[in-house]
Amino acid sequence: MQRKHILLAFAALLFFAACKKETEHAPYPYHRITSFAVQTNGADSVSGAITADTVIIYWPYHLPLPEQVRPKVTVSENATVSPASGTAVDFATGTKYTVEAQDGGLKDYFLKVIVQQPAIQLYTGFGQSVVFGSDMTYDNSTTLRYVIRDNQQTHYFLVDAENNEAELPVTFYTAGRDSMMRVKVPEKGQIAAGPYRIKVTSGTQSVITENAVLGVVNGWEDRPVVNELSGSMTWKRGETITFEGTQFADMQGARLYSLPDWWTETELGALELVSATATSATYRIPDTLPTGTYTFNDDGPNTMRIQLRISDYFPGYNPVSPKPIYVDVKGSDTIVVTE
Amino acid sequence: MKTTLQLAAPLLALCMGIFSCTKTDTVPAPPEAANRILEFRIVNVTGDPIYGAVNDEDSSIQVYLPYDKQLVIIEPEITVSEGATVTPESGTMVEDLLDYFWKGRDLRYVVKSKDGATRTYTLHISVQQPDLYMEELSPDAENITGYELDLSQIYTNIFLVARGSGFSENHELVRMVLVKDDGTELPPLPMSVTNTNNISELTAVISAYPGSMDETIAALKTGGLYRLRIYSYSKVSTMHHPIRITVKN
């Protein structure tokens, strides 16, 4: 008898269960993420933009980027999401969410974190030069804007013509109200003198100047110094003349000019460099130099001045508009130019 | 008999069950709304579009513009449910964002499904830029800094130098205005501009000469206290303490 009751109850259960099914909906097939929000700062949050299988989070650059977040996630009706809403997840591109529809269908979404950091703005003006071992400063409100003021995240490089990069150490500091960045230029010998492009990286951003805008140069105290001339000199056209001095390096040609009317330089001729040592430079006297007697280092008619062209890489050099740099030959006497 | 009943009852029930099951029509899952915005993307930028976050629960679209693109017009491309239409249509520019940021404006999109059901989305645009911070020109409410324009001079001017942070270097996105006690604004002040505009300092110049017909000078002649307000792209900030500007004839 008891067995019969159990069977009857079972049968009834089956019956009612079957009947109950009449009012049920088919399982929902929907498995979308319908909203996704990440807390930014206090009560503020950013909403994720959901496209295909990606949840894009645009993160404001001026707020620190958290390593983990607890996104609030909503999904299609009757679907479930894993990890669940409010669960801590890595705040990084690639973090996966899986939505399971009521009918068991699965859909994966992947996070994409985009830090909307402004492009670095570097103002280089019209080019400049800096001496080995000196400091350069940038004002982060004017000349170098939108870098992260942290020398772990912001790096400064000089890039030469062969694309070799030299990183220069940077220091962030404030001067009064001004937010500054100091760059230490290497000592002589660590990098070559010459023109460089500037590259700055900061966080996700990077900028490099199109052209060389910074010249790294020798100090003026390192320039060649020419011994003063004394006595009367006779130059024979086509022969050579040697100037002696100290710190001669990278000597180029020389120029002869006069100041006949005291303010306009008139070229008399160019001296071609024949040979040079650290203490002397020898030049050929041009055949075209007019013969006669010149008063040396004086102004007016029949005068002559001499400048030896040295390396371009001295203060005054500008890689944007390089101009030859000369040292004056001093002394006072006469030069007689003969055939 | 007992055995028969014992066997028949569950069989009968089972038959009834199966019978009733076969009669059941499964109610399909209701279709998703057919008047939805599926995707909203800003395309007048180089590189990837900027995607808006579409929220069906509150029918909103939130767009986060990057600070440095300095967009004042956006061109959204909108994808809607199959067969639906959207007004304004995809590709319609949203213009004068500065006006939207500074004065506020309703930006709405109406999506109509093919069976005629409509849903209205509201577009919210924000720029991911730092807040504006300004140092006060007057040390406190009791010690009000005064400025004087002496119109008896051939030329007279005052400089209002606002120091702080978060100012845009692009002065086309910036306005400096004086706000009267009653909340009304004077016309925007002329600002000094250089090729390295300072993002932590802004300078307004008010200049006058005898007989100048400047609207600002005319307004300033009524005297009183003013607060300096700065609009910078999507942000606005007003000094807490007023300054006094006196115009001397």
Image (spheres, coloured by chain):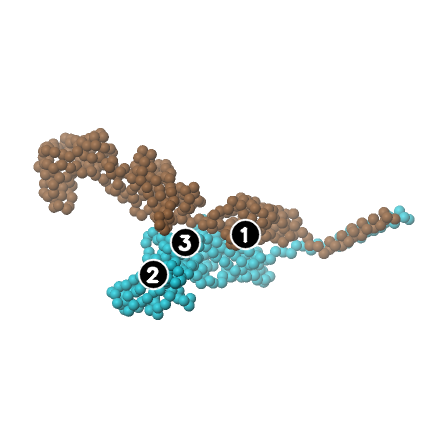
Chain colours: A brown, B cyan
Using a 10 Å C-alpha cutoff, classify the residue at mark 1 as few (fewer than 14 neighbours), some (14 to 19) or many (20 or more).
many
At 21% from the left and 39% from the top, the residue drawn is A326
In the structure shown, which secondary structural element does the residue marked by tag 2 occupy? loop
Left or right: residue B231 compared with residue B6 = left
Question: Quick check: marks 2 and 3 in contact, CB under 8 Å?
Answer: no
Q: What's the CA distance linking mark 2 and mark 1?
A: 41 Å
Residue bearing the label numbered 1: A37
Disc number for residue A88? none
The chain under label 3 reads: B
At 83% from the left and 50% from the top, the residue drawn is A8
The chain under label 1 reads: A
The mark closer to the camera, 2 or 3, is 3
The mark closer to the camera, 3 or 1, is 3
Q: Amino acid at mark 1?
A: Ala
Nearer to the camera, A131 or B240: B240
On the question of residue B73 being in view, the answer is no
Disc number for residue B190? 2
Q: What's the CA distance linking mark 3 and mark 1?
A: 26 Å
> Residue B201 at x, y = what percent?
36, 54
> Residue B199 at x, y = what percent?
38, 53
Q: Amino acid at mark 3?
A: Gly
In the structure shown, which secondary structural element does the residue marked by tag 3 occupy? loop
Nearer to the camera, A45 or A164: A45
Q: Is residue B218 above or below residue B21?
A: below
The chain under label 2 reads: B
> Residue B138 at x, y = what percent?
37, 60
Using a 10 Å C-alpha cutoff, classify the residue at mark 2 as few (fewer than 14 neighbours), some (14 to 19) or many (20 or more).
some
Residues marked 2 and 1, same chain: no
> Residue A86 at x, y = what percent?
58, 49
